[in-house]
Amino acid sequence: MANDQIYRYARGATSERDEAALHIERAYWRGFSAERMRISKPLEFGFRFQGHTHGLALADIVKTDGEITIDGLGRSVQRDFRDKLTFLPKGASIEGWSKFKDRRSWSLTIFLDPNIDERGELCADDLPPCLHFENVLLKESMQKLNAVMSSSMLHEQTYAEHVGLIILCELRNALLGKREAPKLRGGLTARQLNHLRDYITANLDKDISLSELAQLTNLSKFHFIRAFKRTTGTAPYQFVLSSRVNRAKELLAEPNSSISAVARSVGFHSILQLDRAFRRLTSMTPSSYRDQVTDNKS
């Protein structure tokens, strides 16, 4: 198993039914990955983790027994983990065991590449380990990532990277006890904005990452997000999504193109993804939009 994932081991006999009660989903984006664990019945297992990434977890878990040991913080026997966050910097280790209460429980862990912010403006290397803390803004950002894993936004690189950087920023604020953000050097130039628009238009059929867009402007991802929003009034991922839907509208006006072909040609991985994005921005389904265009031409 990769060293950026949690190692789990059974304590005592574990039946196939017990294993079925533990459901794990993983997603990977540029600069970070996420693992969501869901438990549907009482279960007991141990775990240990030490990796080359920073790990941040949000939990909705209640245990009947168990313990956790983390580098430099000693041993904890806390049992109520609802809305609790835990941060483990790279190189540190955590281990323990848990016996879960008879309730539906879940946890979401994000594994941050130490180089996620390539220019070091939001470096997490100086952050200490922290066990079972609370922070409203960080919790909300983690919940956005949790929603991504359950939605059509799963494959939207620009949005996922945006959420990852926000989590990193909020993590620094939470653990350092202060609000800090690198100074913004201004918005984008007209030339930069035109270059971005041309690039997005030419690559709508592909996954467009935040990293690619930031590189086009020679800005860090963090500064790029802020500069783009200052200039356009919208976030990069919203601009990309809007560009996909606008192009889809043009293609839907062509009667010979299937909706599945339209979805692929504008970068959606399925008709469902196109449908959800289309509804979000137009309050219509792709098929109803096509019917409306056809009626107007009649």
Image: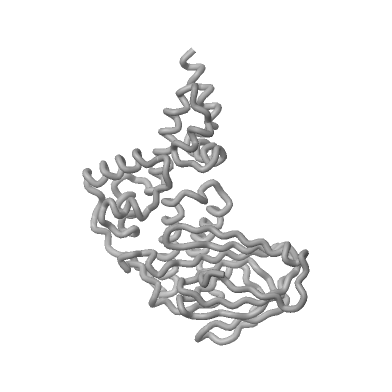
Above or below 72: residue 232? above
Above or below 242: residue 217? below
Number of numbered tags placed on the structure image: 0
Observer able to see residue 159 = yes
Location of residue 286 in the rendering, given as x and y in whole percent from the top left corner: 52, 31
Residue farthest to the front? Answer: 1
Most foreground residue, 19 or 165: 19
Above or below 15: residue 194? above
Observer able to see residue 173 = no
Location of residue 173 in the rendering, given as x and y in whole percent from the top left corner: 41, 69
Residue in the image at 27% along x and 57% along y? 219
Residue in the image at 63% along x and 80% along y? 96
Residue 204 as seen in the image, left or right of residue 135? left
Most foreground residue, 277 or 265: 265
Q: Quadrant of the N terminus?
A: bottom right
Location of residue 14 in the rendering, given as x and y in whole percent from the top left corner: 76, 72
